[in-house]
Amino acid sequence: MHWLGKPRSLDFRVGAAADLEMLHSLEIELFGEEVWSREHLLRALEDSGQEFRLALDGPRLAGYVWLDWCAGERGTVEVDGLVVAPNYRRRKVAERLLHWAVDRAAQAGWPRLQLKVRADNLPALKLYAKFGFHKVEDLPGVYPGGKDGLLLRLEQILAKAPDFARKRSQLEGWLGQA
Ligand SMILES: CC(C)(COP(=O)(O)OP(=O)(O)OC[C@H]1O[C@@H](n2cnc3c(N)ncnc32)[C@H](O)[C@@H]1OP(=O)(O)O)[C@@H](O)C(=O)NCCC(=O)NCCS
């Protein structure tokens, strides 16, 4: 871990076009050639139908979630990206970002979140299972190298909102372990 002593709390804020380089650098660091192009990310950052939420440690990007309100049918918000930088993992950064996504959907009165995940991505599958996502479809060979994917959904967000709000409040101010 790069920090010394007690871990600092992170700041969470909306992402904007000015954050492009930071987002693209993290994509390259994690996924190499498989990343979204700079142009694609910029279009998404400038698109009013898409939203980014960033987790920041001072000037450093610790993670982000990316929502697309127009990719699926009405009522279904698509999670296009959820990424946490290696140094910040297991500090509930992804969990806090995903709680924000659930809350955004609930506020908008939309009942579903949907996302694609590699079938062998166990950390992500455990995270999504913790939130109650379930599989709606197998997506054979959709990832680079012919890797299989899964389409997952979290349904009935409005009915579950009080439960999510309780869990979210338990995570507020969470620092995690260095
Ligand atoms: C998957 C990923 C986003 C998780 O981020 P994170 O901030 O480390 O996750 P959190 O600390 O919020 O963990 C929340 C839950 O996820 C699960 N989880 C996360 N990482 C895990 C791991 N390495 N092994 C097992 N479970 C894990 C656990 O259920 C955990 O709950 P717990 O703390 O009560 O055990 C992160 O590993 C990552 O960025 N991976 C590369 C990009 C990626 O795969 N994104 C998802 C694409 S669909």
Image: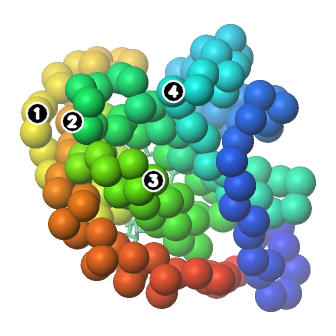
Res 23 → quadrant: top right
Disc 1 packing (10 Å; few <14; some 14–19; many ≥20): few
Q: Pointer 2: what residue? A: 151
Q: Of helix, strand and loop, which one carries label 2?
A: strand
The answer to the question of whether label 2 and label 1 lie on touching residues, with beta carbons closer than 8 A, is yes
Q: Residue 104: which numbered mark, if any?
A: 3
- Residue type at mark 4 is Gly
Distance (Cα) linking label 1 and label 4: 25 Å
Q: Residue at x 27, y 37 (%)?
A: 76
- Report x, y in % for residue 105: 38, 50
Q: Can you tell which quarter of the image residue 132 is in?
A: bottom left
- Categorize mark 2 by other alpha carbons within 10 Å: few (<14), some (14-19), many (20+): some
Depicted 79 relative to depicted 105: above or below: above
Callout 1: CB less than 8 Å from ligand 1 = no
- Work out whether residue 73 or residue 33 is closer to the camera in this orientation and state it: 73
In the image, which disc is placed on residue 137? 1
Residue density around tag 4, few if under 14, some if 14–19, many if 20 or more, within 10 Å: few
Name the amino acid, label 2.
Leu
Q: Is mark 4 within 8 Å of ligand 1?
A: no
The residue singled out by tag 4 in the image is 49
Residue 106 position within the rendered picture, expressed as x and y whole percent measured from the top left: 35, 57
Which of the two labelled residues, at mark 4 and mark 2, occupies the earlier sequence position? 4
Relative horizontal placement of residue 7, taking residue 103 as reference (left or right): right
Say if 76 sits above or below 56 in the image. above
The amino acid type of the residue labelled 1 equals: Glu
Marks 2 and 1, the one that precedes in the sequence: 1
SS for callout 1: strand
Rendered location of residue 135, percent (x, y)? 13, 45
